[in-house]
């Protein structure tokens, strides 16, 4: 199966200009460096059929030569390093669809699709290519400077591509790590196609949601973990621009991406555990904690205070409280932006990607670790799903006895199972299994929602109590204090109904048929 294995790093023009002069590259260079101008036009239907099915189609001009490339892009959320591609020289600026045979494009080419294919966006870059020998591998380093263009919209391209021409992924990862130590460059998880489509839609900095994950049912645990974890990393890192723009949904999605990645590591803990994994989990926890105030205050505003204003339109303390919380939310967003622009975050995202590519978990000769890596993924998935479902049923039977911390642990267990069903869904894709899975997921989602509501209530009550402050502050802000009291009272009343709903959801989940048998 043809594949392009590469890693992208981005940086400002000044940084990119320094790449070719780096002392660490001089002894690695072999052959001749050369500079070319590349103009690439990406094609799709007006309703984005190719994009929806994870297929990219472009025609690239290199001097007088025309190269057609078909890529299996997935949803942009697959392996950050590897994408399947089929490239052929053609004779015109229009795609030659006869060459789609044997590619993911071919099944999509109905008569209507062929007739409606047209250019969507283009990239124009000046590329400086430097062939390198690093370790036991041959790697092409390409420095791209140029533009995305879609209609009147334009966006700068400034990136380093490291493409593995021959050799080991571990060498590619090590070289990328060396570059990131020498220069302030950032990992770019989005393909050019993904960024071009975002420009075309006018939503360059929009929130990015989790994509579907396709696993090879005949594959092993190591292959599956990489696919799952890279998808989670994409979900996390692709939302940086949205958060820096101040998008509440971007904050939410980035935190979900971090939690999903931790859940994936937990699902494969026998294979991936160790000091490297613990360090990465620590960084993921730090990221979610830094973004927590922006998210918590946003939820408090949307779910509690704005409805409270509608219920008590004449209560003067409510607008004062809303103004206070909006200010705290803005401060939370400032913290979030500072976090995502920090050196620690830059290094953390690179550290995660390099660990997924070539961490000790993937290279160890320990017989036990090797057996975990080679284990059939279907066997592993069944065990994980069974264990996590059993744990929830056991804890759920004692729901009424659980305190807040214990209910939170149950909620985390439910989230882990929910993410695991998403991770492994493609392994159980038969019509009967799909129907059972849909019913199972509906029941699980209902349980997660009720437990999430209970957790939100507890968080809101805690925030309201903290905001009330000391008795002196309460006397100085009596109207706000009264509004906070309304919040606590309404949340306490809502808690009783949520607890009853959670009990019902637990009982229904206990009777749900597993889809993985």
Image (cartoon, rainbow, N blue to C red):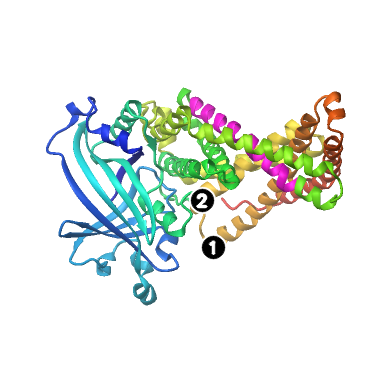
Q: Start and end of the magenta stretch?
A: 277-304
- Between 267 and 2, which is closer to the camera in this rendering? 2
- Visible residue check, residue 396: no
Q: Is residue 92 left or right of residue 157?
A: left
Q: Is residue 499 left or right of residue 145?
A: right
- Between 464 and 418, which is closer to the camera in this rendering? 464
Is residue 296 part of the magenta span, yes or no? yes
Mark 1 or 2, closer to the camera: 2
Report, in whole angstroms, how far the alpha carbon at label 1 lies from the one at label 2: 34 Å
Whole-percent x, y for residue 31 in the image: 12, 37
Whole-percent x, y for residue 295 in the image: 64, 40
Q: Which residue is mark 1?
A: 431
Is residue 469 part of the magenta span, yes or no? no
Main SS class of the magenta portion in the image: helix
Whole-percent x, y for residue 189 in the image: 41, 43
> What is the secondary structure assignment of the residue under circle 1?
helix
Q: Which mark is residue 495?
A: none
- Between 207 and 329, which is closer to the camera in this rendering? 329
Which residue is at 87% across, 34% downward?
478
Q: Quadrant of residue 248?
A: top right
Q: Which mark is residue 206?
A: 2
Whole-percent x, y for residue 268 in the image: 50, 36
- Between 442 and 161, which is closer to the camera in this rendering? 161
- Visible residue check, residue 21: yes
> What is the secondary structure assignment of the residue under circle 2?
loop
Q: Quadrant of residue 435?
A: bottom right
Q: Where 493 falls versus 430 (above or below)?
A: above
Which residue is at 31% across, 27% downward?
178
Q: Earlier in the sequence, mark 1 or mark 2?
A: 2
């Amino acid at each position: 199966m043809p594949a392009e294995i590469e890693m992208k790093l981005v940086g400002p023009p000044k940084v990119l200009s320094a790449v070719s002069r780096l002392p660490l590259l001089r002894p690695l260079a072999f052959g001749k460096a050369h500079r070319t101008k590349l103009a690439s036009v990406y094609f799709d239907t007006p309703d984005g059929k190719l994009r929806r099915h994870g297929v990219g189609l472009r025609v690239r001009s290199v001097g007088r030569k025309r190269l057609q490339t078909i890529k299996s892009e997935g949803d942009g959320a697959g392996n950050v390093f590897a994408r399947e591609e089929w490239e052929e020289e053609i004779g015109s600026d229009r795609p030659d669809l006869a060459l789609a045979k044997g590619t993911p494009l071919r099944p999509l080419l109905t008569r209507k699709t062929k007739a409606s294919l047209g250019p969507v966006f283009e990239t124009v870059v000046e590329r400086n290519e430097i062939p390198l020998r690093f370790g036991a591998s041959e790697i092409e380093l390409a420095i791209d400077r140029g533009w995305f263009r879609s209609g009147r919209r334009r966006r700068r391209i400034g990136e380093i591509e490291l493409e593995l021409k021959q050799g080991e992924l571990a060498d590619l990862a090590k070289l990328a790590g060396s570059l990131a130590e020498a220069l302030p460059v950032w990992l770019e998880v989005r393909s050019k196609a993904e960024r071009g489509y975002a420009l075309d839609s006018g939503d360059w900095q929009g929130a990015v949601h989790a994509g579907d994950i396709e696993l090879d049912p005949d594959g092993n645990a190591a292959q599956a973990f990489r696919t799952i974890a890279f998808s989670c990393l994409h979900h996390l890192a692709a939302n940086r621009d949205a958060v820096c723009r101040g998008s509440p949904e971007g904050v939410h999605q980035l935190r979900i991406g971090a939690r999903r990645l931790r859940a994936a590591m937990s699902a494969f803990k026998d294979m991936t555990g160790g000091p490297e994994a613990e360090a990465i989990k620590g960084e993921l926890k730090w990221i979610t904690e830094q973004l927590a105030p922006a998210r918590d205050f946003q939820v408090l505003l949307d779910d509690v205070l704005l409805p409270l204003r509608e219920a008590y339109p004449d209560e003067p303390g409510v607008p004062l409280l809303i103004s206070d919380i909006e200010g705290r939310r803005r401060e939370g967003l400032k913290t979030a932006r500072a976090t995502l622009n920090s050196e620690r975050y830059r290094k953390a995202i690179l550290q995660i990607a390099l660990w997924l590519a070539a961490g000790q978990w993937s290279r160890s000769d320990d017989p036990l670790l090797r057996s975990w890596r080679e284990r059939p993924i279907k066997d592993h998935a069944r065990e994980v799903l069974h264990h996590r479902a059993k744990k929830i049923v056991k804890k759920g039977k004692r729901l009424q006895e659980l305190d807040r911390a214990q209910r939170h642990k149950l909620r985390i267990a439910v989230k882990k199972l929910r993410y695991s069903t998403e991770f492994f869904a493609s392994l159980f894709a038969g019509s009967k299994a799909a129907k059972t899975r849909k019913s199972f997921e509906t029941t699980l989602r209902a349980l997660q929602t009720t437990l999430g509501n209970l957790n939100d209530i507890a968080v809101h009550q805690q925030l309201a109590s903290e905001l009330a402050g000391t008795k002196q502050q309460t006397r100085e802000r009596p109207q706000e204090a009264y509004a906070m009291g309304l919040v606590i009272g309404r949340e306490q009343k809502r808690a009783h109904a949520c607890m009853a709903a959670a009990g019902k959801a637990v009982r229904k989940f206990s009777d749900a048929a597993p889809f993985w048998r």
